[in-house]
Amino acid sequence: MQQAHSKFGSIQIHAQRVCRTLLLCALWLTCTAPALAAPLQAQWSFRLLPGDAQLQAHPGMDAWKQATVPGSVHTDLMAAGVIGDPYVGAAEAKLQWIGLGDWEYRARFDVDAATLAKRHSELRFDGLDTFAEVSLNGAPLLSANNAHRTWQARVDGRLKASDNELRIVFRSPIRSLLPQVQAMPNKIAGNYPSSYGDEPKDAMVGNFVRKPAYHFGWDWGPRYVTAGVWRAVQLQSWDDNRITDLAVRTDALDAQHAELSVLLQLEQADAAGKATVVVDVLDPDGKRVARVERDAALQPGSNELQLPVRIAQPRRWWPVGYGAQDRYTVQARVDGGRRDEHNASIRTGLRTVKLQRDEDTDGGQGFAFVINDVPVFAKGANVIPFDAFPARVTREHLRRDLQAARDANMNMLRNWGGGYYEDDAFFDIADELGLLVWQDFMFGGGMQPGYDPAFRSNVVAEARDNIRRLRHHPSIVLWCGNNEEETAWKDWGHGKTLRDADPAFAAKVWQGYVDLFGNDLRKVVAEEGLGVPYWSSSPSNDLDSKANDSRRGDKHYWDVWGGPALPVTAYLNETPRFMSEYGLQAWPQLSTVDAFASRQEQQVEGEVIRAHQKFMAGKGNERLLHYIEMEYGTPRTFGDFVYLSQVMQAEGIALAALHHRASRPYTMGSLYWQLNDVWPGASWSSVDYFGNWKALHFHARRFFADVAVAALRDAGETRVSLLNDGRAPLEAQLRYRVMDVDGRVLQQQQQAVTLAPLAATAFARFKDAALLEGADPTRTLAVFELLSGDTLLAQRIVYFAAAKEQALTRNAVHAELQAEGDHYRLRLHSEQLARAVWIDFGNNAVQLDDNAFDLLPGQPRDVIVRSRADLSQLRAALRLDTLGDVLHATPVSSRFRSSRFRSSQDNASIQRNP
């Protein structure tokens, strides 16, 4: 997401070398993951470290309280009843003390006799947030300084049968780094300054600590500087040797055969030895299709084995819409696999990936993903963290939102760099659903101290750790160095400001950037990434002279919404090679707002609503109103404000996405900002925190459909393109009708068309005069449809006037809800045009197969409704909103024009068409 300083000025912080690798104990220590380990069974507790300064304001917090691991201090405090829900009301200001405290966690556990009998043992920490000092049974074990790494320490001979005690002290990252940051004589860019006084605005520490950047606050989420054991702690024991890594590299792949290399890492404990290694490959049906066996001589330490495997007639993994998501299981066993540490297994898909960058004759350069030799137009969205407290994100939550992406006909998601590397479950689900993943390394913006070798070394270890953990997932098709750091330096003034202040230091900072993102991470991906391409920054041209270039590389476009706040039609004038960010904001539905604000608190300028609107430090509703009023007029109530924000967002993003698709093959990707939410509030998401689809997501299912019509009107002309992402030509009929709002057809034409495969086919351009033929533009619309026989394949409606000027009717839609088998059928009918129909059943849990659509006059539309609620409940709760209802209701007061709308409690009296 483009940051506030790129849109509304510059945020700077002092900088010099501050990040040092913490000294580790004189114990064997590594950051690679063993094949198998058991979760540590322990009783966890936590407290504010005795003597901490925060005890003055929070006495008694140094008493031990029960903790949950994985978790965080915020969720543990909430479970203990010390704090309320950090998402409800305007809680942030009162909870910043938590991030200033040093916290201690304690685990007490026993160890069984079988584990103690093994010669070697190791504790593995999958996530320590962040500056952590770990001790075991009273003796130091390790120090950690990176929340993104997996930390391991040998504990040979240090475990007891009972009463083991593990202690972890987490130091406040703000207090740990702030003195050094404040002492810096020069400035480099940070991200979002605190509004709460816990950290000076000119000395932000977030870019100097390897911790999720969004914990320090972003323009879509709260500031909660967490600490704790955020991923699992595991214990593994073994005797002679163990498998520590298993990977599969694709050396050659086509429809006839696959040439693979199975890469196995074995650790031999003490003296040299021998082992028999067996690798089996099972096809997607579980049938063994290959076996390789080898006797290996092992030296003490790490041993790398490479075993060739050949598969005939391989079943390749494809992105959704291009083929099946077949996956193979690769199993490795050492000496018969009699022990856990002698077994490893991964599930992976066979596919090739290429980032195709063909040069144009005019100096441009393409940017396209090619999977299994087929160019793929990327359709999707950016993903942000799913919660402020990632340990409480469940597999069900991930599946809900990723399934929503696939259901909206997306085939790619970009994992944005200001969060954390997602859990394996995310990628398992993406593999299953056929969703390609663009994976950022965890750098969200600003600038890093890449001039510090210790900082870079820490990042390289982090990258190697996570690439090895995730590289078997076929969904990952790109590793990207960072989010927006190159363009911030080159285009937002960050580099110029520092060069003006201290040219030598500026040169050092930029060289550190090139060293880290141009060299170090590129090298790690080449070594560990199994052929997946690397890209240094988004947006960029991979360290070419210009960063955010429409003709080369990927593009972030925020002139609409951000910066100059251009109208949404400006999207039609921006044609990039690959659009990796663009977006418009909207509020979630009222039932989601109800979760954090009472109806009385639901005032646009109220404290709670502003607290959940992070853009422009709480003033984002002013920008939102600007876009609403441009096309739709001034909302009367808070409920109307929410509704119109969603309509504006959906229609604007549809315009951009269809333009990108119509520009194929020049443009080969459209990823809007953003898919999901980190908490309930205003944002650019299409799916809210609770999984409810905004209007945008319903629109996305239509504008990202494999077959679509792009009828795009700008400056008095409508350009029509026919879109086909299928791999075969499509024969169809194109019909276009011009009609008035009462359904009277003014002109109509229909003709046979052929949609080329994997292409956008230009059909025609129509001047307004030719379509209107003198008709009133406020009462006229043009409908473009693709038909196969009587089946409607795609539809796009073009309007000739702003919605606020159109002749739309109130209470135009008639609804009939009936039970039908295991679901309900809602039939909607109108004799006049009904724009932006929104179906709502209040607090009843429902699934709708469609919503947020325009209802043409005289053409009924059926919507399937699934719910556990009975028919009478649903009929009583049913509410329909349309633009005619909202825009032509009786005005309340001119004072609402200054964005002080009535609370949504006032909406109770305007249930429309139940």
Image (tube, rainbow, N blue to C red):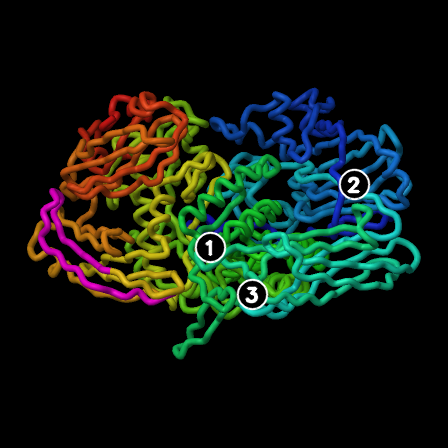
Amino acid tagged 2? Leu
Distance between the alpha carbons at the discs numbered 2 and 1: 38 Å
Q: Nearer the viewer, mark 3 or mark 2?
A: 3
| Residue 131 locus on image (x, y percent) | 71, 42
Query: Of the residues shown, which amino acid type is indicated by label 3?
Result: Thr
**Residue 481 locus on image (x, y percent):** 58, 59
Q: Which residues are magenta?
A: 733-758
799 falls in the magenta region: no
> Could you tell me what secondary structure mostly forms the magenta stretch?
strand
Q: Nearer the viewer, residue 73 or 453?
A: 73
What's under tag 1, amino acid-wise? Val
Mark 2: few/some/many CA within 10 Å (<14, 14-19, 20+)? many
Looking at this view, is 96 or 79 the one in front?
79
Query: Where does residue 905 sit, x and y in percent of width and height?
Result: 32, 22
Q: Which quadrant of the structure image shows residue 53? A: top right
Q: Is residue 415 above or below residue 767?
A: above
Task: Label 3: state its secondary structure.
Answer: loop
Residue of label 2? 235
Q: Identify the residue shown where x is 16% and y is 42%.
A: 857
- Determine if the magenta segment contains residue 748: yes
Residue 205 showing in the rendered view:
no
Which numbered circle lies on residue 90?
none
Mark 2 lies on a secondary structure that is strand
Q: CA distance from mark 3 to mark 2?
A: 36 Å
Horizontal and vertical percent position of residue 407: 42, 46
Residue extending furthest toward the left:
774
